[in-house]
């Protein structure tokens, strides 16, 4: 991207923005207007808020900041400022109605395209403007994933359609892979669309460890459930145990026990929980408890990234587990191409040098790390993007889910959430230390 001629860069940004908008439109056109303004869960905004918020951020950063154009709707900035109103309070605001929100995002997009065609893209301005278009594309895609999570919380008949996820290819996978100890480069200073929290590239050292070849499956998680995992205090951290008791949690979100089997509701479809797919809709605390029960632990963020990026042959860190090329449908389950994670082993083309599968796509993976800035972190373009979330309250998730677009994921990408959150498309895989005397 960095060496791209300006014309190609403009075309690339235009294509990425258009793809994001097609998705936002599909997610909001799938339901009627009364559904768009409804709050499906206190955890989520009404879909119509996300839509206008997407437009509002685009107006702020592309139309006003990069373009230097006259504000379109300065009167509504405050309504769509995520820091001014909690999600639970958003339905009570004098929001744009669905028709107004659609007209607003169209108007903003027309102006943003005009800016993209005419903005002087050279020198320092080029880097900054290219980043702004990338940031806004990723922002829209992130809200699309949030809207997809709102769809999952919505009651009623299915309204979204997609091809079923592909089956496993090849033979059974070994349970775990070895990742060598030593230094590697974590983070990036080169990815043009990398967000502030992924920067800068810096050397980090991890001890050798073993990582699960694939995310923990529903089948494996069911064994934990059936072994009484949710009723045994010893597997849970103190915070995890009180969270469990307080919320009366006894299985992953959206799971139901019927006769002797586990069923789940997935975008309005009621189905048997498929045992070979990664478990999804579990909190950090449930992941942590499963790992304790399995005699394992969650990987740190640095371990996850080393397993995903480090190439022992060259000693370099790559952009993705499979190398530096962009994701494709055969490498990873991304972009809402399917409405579920795929069975483990479905993406042999996406395997990492260490032999780990499905690090990118399928489910976000909880790590044991709190969200902090890397050494040399500098907030960009605003403190509220990442910096205000740094601290012990948030856990880092890695790798993206079936609902994450390729534009908003890479080996360095960092997501974060509260350890209690279950509505996001999050699962996990386990790790363990190398025991004394054990060879890699
Ligand atoms: C990176 C997914 C935690 O949704 O809160 C959207 C992304 N930032 N608008 C979020 C984001 C501003 C963010 N996450
Ligand atoms: Fe946002």
Image (cartoon, rainbow, N blue to C red):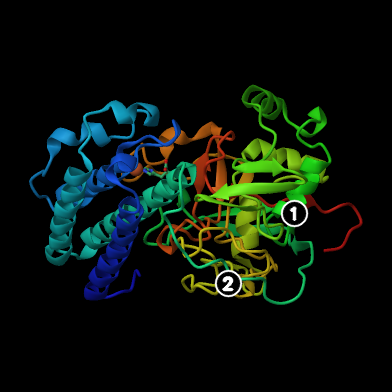
* Image quadrant occupied by the C terminus: bottom right
The reply to whether dot 2 and dot 1 touch (C-beta < 8 Å) is no
From mark 2 to mark 1, how far is it between C-alphas?
27 Å
Q: Is residue 358 left or right of residue 159?
A: right
For disc 1, the marked residue is 219
* Count of marks, rendered view: 2
Disc 1, SS: helix
Confirm if mark 1 falls within 8 A of ligand 1: no
Q: Please indicate, yes or no, whether residue 388 appears anywhere in the rendered image.
A: yes
Give residue 167's quadrant in the image: bottom right
Q: Is residue 122 left or right of residue 242?
A: left
Q: Residue at x 58, y 72 (%)?
A: 322
For disc 2, the marked residue is 322
* Image quadrant occupied by the N terminus: bottom left
Above or below: residue 5 compared with residue 98: below
Q: Residue at x 67, y 53 (%)?
A: 273
Question: Which residue is farthest right?
Answer: 437
Mark 2 closeness class: few <14, some 14–19, many ≥20 residues within 10 Å: many
Above or below: residue 282 compared with residue 358: above
Please tell me whether mark 2 or mark 1 is closer to you in this view: 1
Between discs 2 and 1, the one toward the N terminus: 1
């Amino acid at each position: 991207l960095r060496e791209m001629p300006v014309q190609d860069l403009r075309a690339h940004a235009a294509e990425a923005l258009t793809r994001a908008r097609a998705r936002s439109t599909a997610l909001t056109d799938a339901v009627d207007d009364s559904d768009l303004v409804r709050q499906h869960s206190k955890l989520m905004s009404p879909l119509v808020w996300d839509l206008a918020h997407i437009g509002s951020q685009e107006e702020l950063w592309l139309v006003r900041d990069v373009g230097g154009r006259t504000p379109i709707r300065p009167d509504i900035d405050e309504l769509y400022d995520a820091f001014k109103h909690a999600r639970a309070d958003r339905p009570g605001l004098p929001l744009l109605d669905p028709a107004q929100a659609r007209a607003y995002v169209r108007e903003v997009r027309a102006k943003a395209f005009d800016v993209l065609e005419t903005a002087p893209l050279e020198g320092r301005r080029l880097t900054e403007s290219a980043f702004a278009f990338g940031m806004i594309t990723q922002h829209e895609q992130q809200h699309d994933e949030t809207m997809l999570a709102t769809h999952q919380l919505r009651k009623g008949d299915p309204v979204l359609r997609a091809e079923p996820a592909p089956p496993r290819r090849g033979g059974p996978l070994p349970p775990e892979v070895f990742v060598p100890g030593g230094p590697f480069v974590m983070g990036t200073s080169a990815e043009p669309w990398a967000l502030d929290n992924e920067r800068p590239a810096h050397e980090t050292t991890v001890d050798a460890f073993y990582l699960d070849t694939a995310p923990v499956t529903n089948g494996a998680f069911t064994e934990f459930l059936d072994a009484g995992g949710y009723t045994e205090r010893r597997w849970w951290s103190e915070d995890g145990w009180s969270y469990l008791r307080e919320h009366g949690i006894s299985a992953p979100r959206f799971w139901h026990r019927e006769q002797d089997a586990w069923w789940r509701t997935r975008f309005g479809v009621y189905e048997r929980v498929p045992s070979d797919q990664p478990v999804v809709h579990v909190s950090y605390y449930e992941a942590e408890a499963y790992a304790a029960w399995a005699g394992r632990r969650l990987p740190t963020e640095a371990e996850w990234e080393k397993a995903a990026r480090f190439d022992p042959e060259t000693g370099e860190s790559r952009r993705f587990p499979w190398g530096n090329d962009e994701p494709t449908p055969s490498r990873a389950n991304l972009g809402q191409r399917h409405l579920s994670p795929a069975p483990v082993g479905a993406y042999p083309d996406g395997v990492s040098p260490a032999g780990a599968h499905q690090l990118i796509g399928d489910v976000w993976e909880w790590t044991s790390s709190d969200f902090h800035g890397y050494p040399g972190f500098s907030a960009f373009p605003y403190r509220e993007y990442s910096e205000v979330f740094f601290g012990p309250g948030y856990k880092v998730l890695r790798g993206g889910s079936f609902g994450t677009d390729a534009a908003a994921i890479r080996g360095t990408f960092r997501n974060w959430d509260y350890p209690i959150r279950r509505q996001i498309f999050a699962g996990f895989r386990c790790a363990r230390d190398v025991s004394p005397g054990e060879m890699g």
